[in-house]
Image: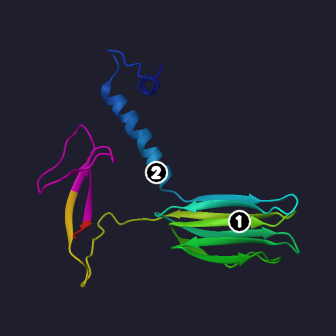
């Protein structure tokens, strides 16, 4: 069994090199994290419905994503549309025959719902783009904002966060993550 296989199945032996195992885990984590940061395409289909029933399908756009409409395919004389629900407001885009629509963008969180009337069908392709953040991004508290408590937090697993203090950090044994947290004061 390979070191990675042993690591993933818990089959450590006394001869297993721990540095190799750590490197294998970090490689897997970097690959997973890198994949989560890339753009992706999603295609949803609605229809054909039966009787007087319309069919729907939907995509949720996360708060950390932006959706771009790439293509919206409908059939002539149909009752297809897609709906964008953002901040409690609904926007309808009825289907049309002809060239692809002008690209539309919506910043998450949002819902995009595709609907096809009875006996109809439609297809919508979206490009979901992750938000990118500058590592050296500045947090700005504009004038006139209510008071907030600002704290620096640290984690070694991105799940459990603790308050950090000014100081020197570093360890050859594990990675350490930092974030700035702002909490509104009552």
> Where residue 8 sits in the image (x, y, percent)?
44, 27
145 relative to 115, above or below: below
| Residue at the (43%, 65%) spot, across then down | 132
Tell me if 58 is positioned left or right of 20 in this view.
right
Is residue 152 within the magenta segment?
Answer: no
- Depth check: give the residue in front, 158 or 54: 54
Q: Name the residue under label 2.
A: 34
- Depth check: give the residue in front, 84 or 125: 84
| Residue at the (45%, 23%) spot, across then down | 9
Q: Quadrant of the C terminus?
A: bottom left
Q: Mark 1 falls on what kind of element?
A: strand
Tell me if 100 is positioned left or right of 150 in this view.
right
**Which stretch is magenta?**
153-182
> Where residue 93 sits in the image (x, y, percent)?
70, 77
Q: Which colour scheme is used?
A: rainbow
- Depth check: give the residue in front, 40 or 74: 74
User: Going by the picture, which residue comes out furthest to the left?
Assistant: 167
Badge 1 density bin: few <14, some 14–19, many ≥20, Cα 10 Å = many
Q: Name the residue under label 1.
A: 114
182 relative to 175, above or below: below
């Amino acid at each position: 069994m390979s070191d990675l296989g042993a690591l993933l199945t818990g089959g450590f032996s006394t001869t297993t090199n721990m540095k190799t195992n750590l490197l294998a885990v970090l490689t897997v984590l970097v690959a997973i994290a890198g994949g989560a940061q890339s753009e992706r395409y999603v295609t949803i289909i609605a229809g054909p419905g039966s009787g007087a029933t319309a069919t729907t399908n939907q995509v949720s756009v996360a708060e950390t994503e932006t959706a771009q409409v790439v293509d919206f395919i409908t059939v002539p004389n149909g009752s297809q549309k897609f709906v964008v629900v953002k901040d409690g407001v609904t926007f309808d885009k009825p289907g049309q025959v002809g060239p692809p629509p002008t690209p539309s963008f919506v910043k998450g969180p949002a819902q995009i719902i595709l609907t096809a009337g009875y006996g109809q069908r439609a297809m919508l392709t979206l490009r979901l783009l992750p938000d990118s953040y500058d590592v050296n991004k500045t947090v700005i508290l504009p004038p006139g904002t209510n008071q907030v408590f600002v704290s620096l937090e640290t984690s070694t697993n991105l799940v459990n966060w603790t308050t950090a203090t000014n100081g020197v950090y570093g360890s050859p044994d594990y990675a350490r993550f930092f974030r700035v947290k702002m909490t509104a004061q009552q």
